[in-house]
Image (cartoon, coloured by chain):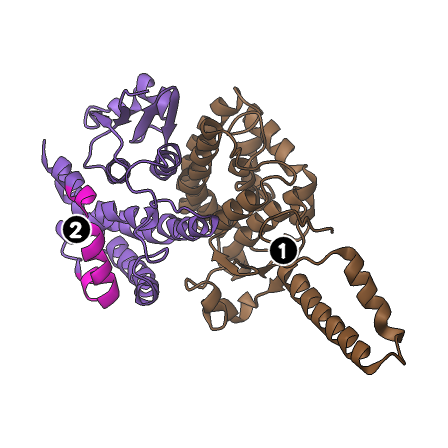
Amino acid sequence: MSVNLKFSYWKYVIIPRGRREEGGEEKGGRGRMRKGRNRVEEKKKEEEGELKSIKLAMAIKVHGISLSTCTARVLLCLHEKGLDYELVHVDVASGAHKKQPYLSLNPFGLVPAIDDGNVRLFESRAINRYLARKHEDIGIDLLRSKTLTESAIVETWMEVEAHQFNGPIYAINHQMIISPLYGLDPDEKIIKSELEKLEKVLDVYEERLSKSAYLAGENYTLADLNHIPFLVYFMRTPHASVVTARPHVSVWWNNISTRKATIEVAAGMKLH
Amino acid sequence: MTSPVKVYGPPMSTAVSRVLACLIEKDVDFQVIPVNMSKGEHKKPEFLKMQPFGQVPAFQDDKISLFESRAICRYICEKYADKGNRGLYGTSPLAKASIDQWLEAEAQSFNPPSSALVFQLAFAPRMKLKQDPGVIKQNEEKLAKVLDVYEERLGDSQFLAGDEFSLADLSHLPNSNYLLSVTDRGALFTSRKNVGRWWDEISSRDSWKKVVEMQKSP
């Protein structure tokens, strides 16, 4: 994956391609004058150091696991933007996220956290905002940040995801998918009451999506993207019918789940 | 352009008061439009056109109609960037990223247990609803863990997102205020040295004092 070097952030650490290649050729440069050789070696060392730091600086490190919905939320954003990243596995099964050194990345002990050069962040939705802003010009503008009236609508539906949608779908997925992993039976009472809440939310979405292709308007944005991780798992349960029974919500899900980035990230979300 | 922005909903609502605090910090003129929730006005068709989930607040400015208090706050900070407290939502991308991070911590980690406690301890008695001791205990434990993280953070920096008061701090005011001034659970905050210091600072800002006054007036 190629990395876009256009950002002001990078311009201070980038060396021109020509200089890099010249440095590479110096390997066989024996028999030169001592002074010259030192200079060349010094230059080489300097460049190797620079290259190393560029390499380290370039790939965004995502600390998490591909199965985690909140990790997947960040990966979706990175894939949409075509950004280079390294997924650093956090051994959640053995509780590594509740211990140091992970707690220094996220004091709440939750995945994911990112490390992007001098920027360390946690909270998937905040990370996505940061990535979308920083890389506004690559690929699609996921925040519609050029027009305040559009970005405010994106923000509104991002909050709807976080405050209306996330609660019930999290509870249902927990009962349907997580509990069985621990040998527990799903609590049907919880599932029923949370499904009722989710259906009410989806009724509002149905109305909204009958007027626009995506939640924040005619463009795919973070407001849609942030919904994907929980839906990936939810749509594998028998309760998926609450989505497919609503024609506009169903079309929306078909659109957002068949995006290249979604397919790539969902491939890492297989529990069996 | 000069007409004040409109906030629909009662100041005693935590989400409404979040928006009011932001407007006062930003020195933006506003008008509060009452919504009689006991009569179910927030579930009526006219209101649902502005806020399809039937919750307060709804917000209007010029031709834009918004809802969700944290989204409204972000909009106010962007639209009125040069007014009032200019640093409320940061003035650099990095400051903004840090504010967003702690705003999300508020929304995802602090808000669920603190809202449950506000409802159980402050609103349920007023609404003559039965309290659920199990829910209270569970959420008290959750909130205590969140405040432990805050205690550590606020030992390193004066405010959550850094050394300046920001939207991330402001967003904590509504729920915290109920817990500290209406319920007997204020010790959750005051027993933690840095959290207690932080609460004193953020709650004594003129903007928040004005909101509290608005909550008191009928």
Where disc 1 sits, the SS reads loop
Q: Are marks 1 and 2 on the same chain?
A: no
| Residue bearing the label numbered 1 | A271
- Relative to B215, A160 lies left or right: right
- Image-quadrant location for residue A240: top right
Chain designation of label 1: A
Q: Position of residue B60 (x, y in %)?
A: 33, 24
User: Would residue A70 be visible to someone looking at this image?
Assistant: yes
| Residue bearing the label numbered 2 | B204
Residue drawn at the location 44% of the way across and 48% of the way down:
B92
Whether the magenta-drawn stretch holds residue B105 is answered as no
Question: Magenta residues, as a range?
Answer: B187-209
- Relative to A31, A241 lies left or right: left
Residue type marked 2: Ser
Residue type marked 1: Leu
Chain letter, colour purple in render = B
- Image-quadrant location for residue A250: top right
Label 2 crowd (10 A; few <14 / some 14-19 / many >=20): few
